[in-house]
Image (cartoon, rainbow, N blue to C red):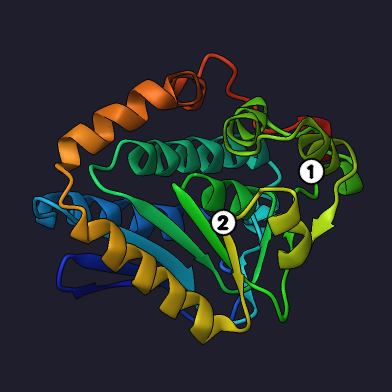
Amino acid sequence: MCSLEKRGSIFILTLRGDGEHRLNPSLLNEIKSTIGSVREEAGASSALITTAEGKFFSNGYDMAWARSSSKEVIERAMLMDSLLRSVVSDLLTLPMPTIAAITGHASAAGYALALAHDYLLMRSDRGFLYMSELDINLVVPAWFVALIDAKVGSPAARRRIVMNAAKLTAKEALLLGVIDSAHHGADDTVEAALALSADLVKRGWDGHVYAQNRKNFLGRLIQAVQDTSQTKPYTLSRL
């Protein structure tokens, strides 16, 4: 479901296959395990790239899996939310720069996964960023909004993302400051992520110092992600 490649001090986590990379427990646990391996193998100065094969970066939670058991739909939705929170928390505390190379559509929870990275690079020839909940009559989880608040500087951009359910192309996302750069195709996006990673690794930063600075910079976001006192990921009457 995902693979890990290492090129020197750069780790590349790739979601494999041509599917939608829906975030169900199997995929989320595999991502979490892979990030754990990155943490264990990290050198003094490293970087992580997360990318995906096919048309989608990730099309969000696997709601079909959640609904496949009518008696357990709420529990399954809460499990996916808990696992994604854990993955995002791992990314936000990883002792190295992290880069999302968004090579396809990123929607809802998939959008949140991308936003958990320090840098977002996106292909410009296809794909969009889409917080889809409003269009499908769901409430955006509060911790998704905390991610958007921390990572998107413009109030107008945040309003478009959450309150207009805008499908942002790379060009629009770049203008709104949601992503750091746009590139022609999937290969160009990954190559740009590799180049950025190489530049960051050359800085020779101590990973633990980097992680502590991120923690201080994004402390309220990390707290919101780790706060499970409000565990319902969506308005569950729609599940």
Marking on residue 117: none
The quadrant in which residue 167 appears is: bottom right
Mark 1 crowd level (few <14, some 14–19, many ≥20, 10 Å Cα)? many
- Decide if residue 61 is in sight here: no
Q: Earlier in the sequence, mark 2 or mark 1?
A: 1
Return the residue at label 1. Answer: 161
The answer to whether residue 25 is above or below residue 184 is above
Q: Is residue 69 visible?
A: yes
Between the residue at mark 2 and the residue at mark 1, the CA separation in whole angstroms equals 17 Å
Determine which of the numbered discs, if any, sits on residue 180 in the image: 2
Q: Is residue 12 left or right of residue 187?
A: left
Quadrant where the image shows the C terminus = top right
| Residue at image coords 26%, 48% | 96
At x 74%, y 49%, the residue is 176
Query: Residue type at mark 2?
Result: Asp
Q: Is residue 191 left or right of residue 133?
A: left
State if disc 1 and disc 2 touch (CB < 8 Å). Answer: no
Residue nearest the observer in this picture, 141 or 152: 152
**Picture quadrant of residue 137:** top right
Rendered view: 123 above or below 79? below
Q: Is residue 51 above or below residue 177?
A: below
Q: Along the line of sight, which residue is nearer the eye, 30 or 204?
A: 204
